[in-house]
Image (cartoon, coloured by chain):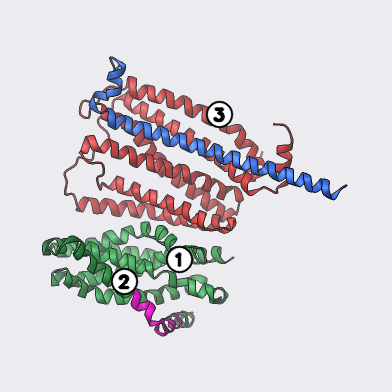
């Protein structure tokens, strides 16, 4: 079981390394979107500091959503997805592998670069840790929820735009608690409440989302 | 005696039944609306705090109730369609979605028209308003997903799964929005939903809610009949049904 | 009775714009839904009639 999981994860990562441009695109998208806000709102440091948690999280949401197309579509196009569904393991396990790989490819780089972007917004150094932790808890959840939407729209015309319509409303709790945690620590309050809820949501998502994604894949490919 | 519930799960038996039921629901919807409007405009007294503007709640609150209730019913039909694999369940879920979206929009619209004179703003990021807006997005996602997939069976099942995922998420979304709202309580708007309600006010609201129920059932049944006709073009029972003079 | 005259009723104690703005738009939306349902119904029935006509024709042509 673990071997299957490992195979799926390492295969997806290998594929991503061979096509590095895709990974870089998501990352640059995140950086560029976050950098556009100061240009739109003016460089007033107080304003930027207040808006930073929200902007960083919205940018992370959009970047994560943008990369959802890669989750199943390429495998669907070359027929791999149907082969993966024949693996003699629960389909949910395959899904977990794919989601893990997706997070490692498009979520983790984002988490790592976010503190640098946060400095652009003059976020106090003390809340950088909270930002890192919140993103670390929240971005896997984005991948998990997004996988459901990606699985539902596999092979559908105009799936990319459709996915955003399906998935963004479901991202709302992640956005609220993720940005809330950073906001709380930036204003000198305790962020542990937000982080605990984010962790609880992540656990809930880890239990339910792979199962729902597997069901969605079966519906899409039957 | 054992009742066979699945008898009406087949479009062939449900189609004529729905046809017979629609006029009754439509008539009671019309009657209840008239009675409710009479109560809400001519019997219910003026609210001493909000003046006449409060009369908007007679559609606002029933519409908001319906928007949430229809989503639950829709998710229920969607679940039934996934579990029992009955065609009619998915059709019912699809028939309910546009009406549910309509009521969500009405709740938002009337909420804005009520909020402007009461809070001084068309839109307030209040927990209830925000959740309602996200509910509208969920309805739109459901409709868009169904419209984007050409194969009816896949469209039915995919949107059913989405409805279920949404139903699991709605409480989480509501809770998180509420939490977020209490943290960001910048503007001090009083969030008391209704003024102290006189009995006639409550009665008017309940009757309007009942009217909305009847209307929703009639609209959903009419739509499900259209869906059945569209999908079962080739079915023999339909040919028989339409050959006989109605 | 709450209203002294029709003008009084329409004015809604100064809140006429809001009250009627809410109610009239709701009425318009519900009417629109009913009309759309009716149009959909007509379109389906028309398609079915055409199909019946077509199959009738095919029958005539194949059984001379």
User: Around disc 1, counting alpha carbons within 10 Å, would you say few (fewer than 14), some (14 to 19), or many (20 or more)?
Assistant: many
x and y percentages locating residue A153 in the rendered image: 49, 63
What secondary structure is the stretch in magenta mostly built from?
helix
According to the picture, the residue beneath numbered tag 1 turns out to be A150
Residue occupying the point 38% across, 82% down: A20
Discs 2 and 3 share one subunit:
no
Looking at the image, the residue that sits furthest to the right is C64
Q: Is residue A95 visible to us here? A: yes
Pointers 2 and 1 in contact (C-beta within 8 Å): no
Pointers 3 and 1 in contact (C-beta within 8 Å): no
Residue occupying the point 35% across, 67% down: A141
C34 sits left or right of A222 in the view:
left
x and y percentages locating residue B114 in the rendered image: 28, 35
A26 sits left or right of A6 in the view:
left
Residue closer to the observer: A207 or A160 = A160
Q: Nearer the viewer, mark 2 or mark 1?
A: 2
Q: Is residue B193 visible to us here? A: no
In the figure, A18 relative to B76: above or below? below
Q: Say what secondary structure mark 1 lies in.
A: helix
x and y percentages locating residue B206 in the rendered image: 39, 30
Q: Say what secondary structure mark 3 lies in.
A: helix
- Which of the marked residues, 2 or 1, is nearer the chain's N terminus? 2
The blue one among the chains is C
Q: State the CA–CA distance, disc 2 to disc 1.
A: 19 Å
In the image, which residues are magenta? A10-26
According to the picture, the residue beneath numbered tag 3 turns out to be B24
The red one among the chains is B
**Which chain letter goes with mark 3?**
B
């Amino acid at each position: 079981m673990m071997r299957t999981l490992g195979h799926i994860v390492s295969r997806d990562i290998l594929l991503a390394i061979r096509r590095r441009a895709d990974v870089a695109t998501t990352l640059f998208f995140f950086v560029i979107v976050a950098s556009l806000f100061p240009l739109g709102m003016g460089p007033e440091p107080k304003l930027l500091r207040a808006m930073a948690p929200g902007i960083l999280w919205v940018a992370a949401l959009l970047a994560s959503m943008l990369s959802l197309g890669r989750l199943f579509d390429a495998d669907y196009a070359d027929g791999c997805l149907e082969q993966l569904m024949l693996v003699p393991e629960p389909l949910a396990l395959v899904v977990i592998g794919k989601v893990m790989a997706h997070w490692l490819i498009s979520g983790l780089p984002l988490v790592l670069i976010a503190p640098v972007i946060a400095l652009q917004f003059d976020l106090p150094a003390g809340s950088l840790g909270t930002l890192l932790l919140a993103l670390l808890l929240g971005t896997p959840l984005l991948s998990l929820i997004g996988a459901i939407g990606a699985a539902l729209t596999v092979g559908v015309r105009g799936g990319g735009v459709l996915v955003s319509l399906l998935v963004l409303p479901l991202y709302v709790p992640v956005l609220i608690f993720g940005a809330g945690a950073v906001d709380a620590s930036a204003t000198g309050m305790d962020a542990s409440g937000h982080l605990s809820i984010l962790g609880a949501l992540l656990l809930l998502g880890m239990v339910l989302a792979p199962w729902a994604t597997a069901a969605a894949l079966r519906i899409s490919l039957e | 005696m054992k009742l066979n519930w699945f008898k009406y799960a087949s479009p062939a038996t449900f189609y004529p039944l729905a046809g017979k039921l629609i006029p009754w629901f439509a008539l009671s919807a019309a009657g209840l609306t008239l009675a409710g409007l009479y109560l809400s405009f001519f019997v219910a007294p003026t609210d001493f705090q909000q003046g006449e503007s409060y009369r908007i709640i007679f559609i606002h609150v029933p519409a908001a109730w319906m928007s949430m209730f229809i989503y639950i019913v829709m998710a229920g039909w969607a679940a039934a369609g996934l579990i029992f694999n009955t065609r009619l369940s998915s059709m019912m879920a699809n028939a309910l979605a546009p009406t549910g979206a309509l009521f969500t929009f009405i709740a938002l619209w009337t909420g804005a028209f009520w909020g402007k004179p009461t809070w001084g703003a068309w839109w307030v990021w209040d927990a209830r308003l925000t959740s309602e807006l996200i509910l509208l997005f969920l309805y739109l996602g459901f409709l868009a997903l169904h419209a984007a997939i050409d194969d009816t069976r896949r469209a039915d099942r995919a949107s059913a799964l989405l409805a279920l995922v949404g139903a699991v998420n709605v409480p989480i979304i509501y809770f998180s929005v509420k939490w977020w709202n209490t943290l960001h309580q910048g503007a001090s708007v009083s969030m008391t939903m209704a003024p102290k309600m006189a009995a006639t006010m409550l009665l008017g609201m309940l009757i309007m809610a009942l009217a909305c129920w009847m209307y929703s059932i009639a609209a959903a049944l009419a739509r499900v009949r259209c869906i059945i006709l569209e999908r079962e073009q080739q079915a023999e029972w339909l040919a028989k049904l339409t050959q006989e003079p109605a | 009775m709450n209203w002294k005259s029709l003008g009084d009723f329409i004015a809604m104690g100064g809140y006429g714009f809001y009250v009627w703005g809410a109610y009239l738009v709701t009425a318009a939306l519900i009417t629109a839904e009913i009309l759309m349902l009716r149009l959909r119904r007509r379109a389906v029935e028309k398609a079915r009639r055409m199909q019946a006509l077509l199959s009738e024709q095919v029958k005539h042509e194949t059984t001379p």
